[in-house]
Image (spheres, rainbow, N blue to C red):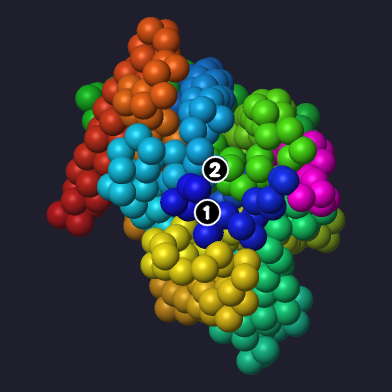
Amino acid sequence: MSPASGSEVPLLPDHRKPGRQASLSGAVFNVSTSIIGAGIMSIPATLKVLGVIPAFVLIVIVGCLVDISVEFLMRFTYSGVSTTYSGVMRESFGRLGSVAVQISVMITNLGCLIVYLIIIGDVLCGNQPEGSVHLGVLQEWFGFHWWNSRVFALLFITIFVMLPLVLLRRVESLSCSSAVAVLLAVIFVGITSGLAITALVEGKTKNPRLLPELDNGVSFLNLFTAVPVIVTAFTFHFNVHPIGSELSKPSDMISVVRISLLLCAAIYFTIGLFGYVLFGESIMEDILVNFDQNSDTAVGSLLNDIVRLSYALHLVLVYPLLNFSLRSNLDEFLFPKRPPLATDTPRFVALTVSLLGFSYLLAIVVPSIWYLFQFLGSTTAVCLAFIFPGAIVLRDVHGISTSKDRIIAVIMIVLAIATSIIAISTNIYSFMGNKS
């Protein structure tokens, strides 16, 4: 039995028994929702850094490499006995490999969940970065009251919206909410595109840069800071096994992943292009900040509010999917020898409530964790997406890797490590330079 079997039971039903299987469309929505999270907001800023053409090329390259890395994971999963990511790593590298995956998933997902709550709080209740006041939708509509403060608004969302969703024990149970989340992302992209086209027709936009401006060595190194952003936006490997195992034919997961990658790549490039066209060089790292502006018309203000609310609701619906894998890996890490999580309701509820409560408290206490998320989340995301799958291929405990596989794995690992080191070093240099 897989060493991760205890944590997988709520998500991976026993296929020896008849039962409801997940649909392909539901799996596509769940994978797409796992991919499209907070990363979509930073995509337009990558076009500002890279230019339109290099950004498009980078999105295509990362998407193709992600498809290859998922295929590596699935192939070694079918060849072994483990049915979780950490289990496959345990087969190749022992307990150390399993723990490495668990820690990476916990850092990446917990960071994402906290960021989601912070963004939702910013949209609903506003924020005051560096003294500048940005009103939330609730303050704009109803004024300032105790019930629409960040503490109470997020508490209401956490208890009455998120808690019922995170208590669901099957990924397939979230297929409907995932479909709504994808629809909301499409609405977000659609409205942004419409505003950009309108501004373009009215001559209110400037032509976006097709190529980056390379005026000195520092700006060249800054190009590498966009790579972890794109990688993080495409990292969903922690949900590949839970979603795929609920399909009647787990091998269909490869097709599901490719459909989802095409859909999400199209969404990413569209929002990146039209977001950049709409706001130009003033585009912020969080595109929602650009929508937090007073409009000259009531229709414009309404569209701004719809964009912000649709995205906040999208994050609410993405939250449970990331919580699934976070809870599973945390349980596997803390209680490796306890009974399966599905059969231990007190432990399941305790872990669920504790994770939700912890992320809520940090979202209230910490005004912004973007630097933390960039240095930790992006690094662990690179490990999950490229370094670990490449290492599994090179280790080749089942003797199934071809020479082509090994070459691709080496290239994948080298590119991941090199770009991560350069990006982190450049960010540290820029951060220290701003403080001096």
Q: For the residue labelled by badge 2, is the local secondary structure a helix, a strand or a loop? A: loop
Closest to the observer: 235 or 250?
Answer: 250
Residue drawn where x is 38% and y is 7% of the image? 403
Give the residue type that dot 2 points to. Thr
Region rendered in magenta? 17-33
Position of residue 333 relative to residue 363, above or below, is: above
Q: Residue furthest top?
A: 403
Answer left or right for 193 relative to 276. right
Position of residue 435 relative to residue 278, above or below, is: below
Residue drawn where x is 41% and y is 24% of the image? 398
Q: CA distance from mark 1 to mark 2?
A: 8 Å
Q: Are marks 1 and 2 in contact (CB under 8 Å)?
A: yes
Q: Residue furthest left?
A: 436
Q: Residue furthest bottom?
A: 146
Residue 330 in the image, given as x and y percentages of width and height: 45, 63
Q: Which of disc 2 and disc 1 is earlier in sequence?
A: 1
Q: Is residue 133 visible?
A: no
- Bin the neighbour count of mark 2 within 10 Å (Cα to Cα): few under 14, some 14-19, many 20 and up: many
Residue 5: mark in rendering: 1
Quarter of the rendering containing residue 141: bottom right
Q: Which residue is mark 2?
A: 83
- Bin the neighbour count of mark 1 within 10 Å (Cα to Cα): few under 14, some 14-19, many 20 and up: some
Give the residue type that dot 1 points to. Ser
Q: Residue 47: within the magenta?
A: no
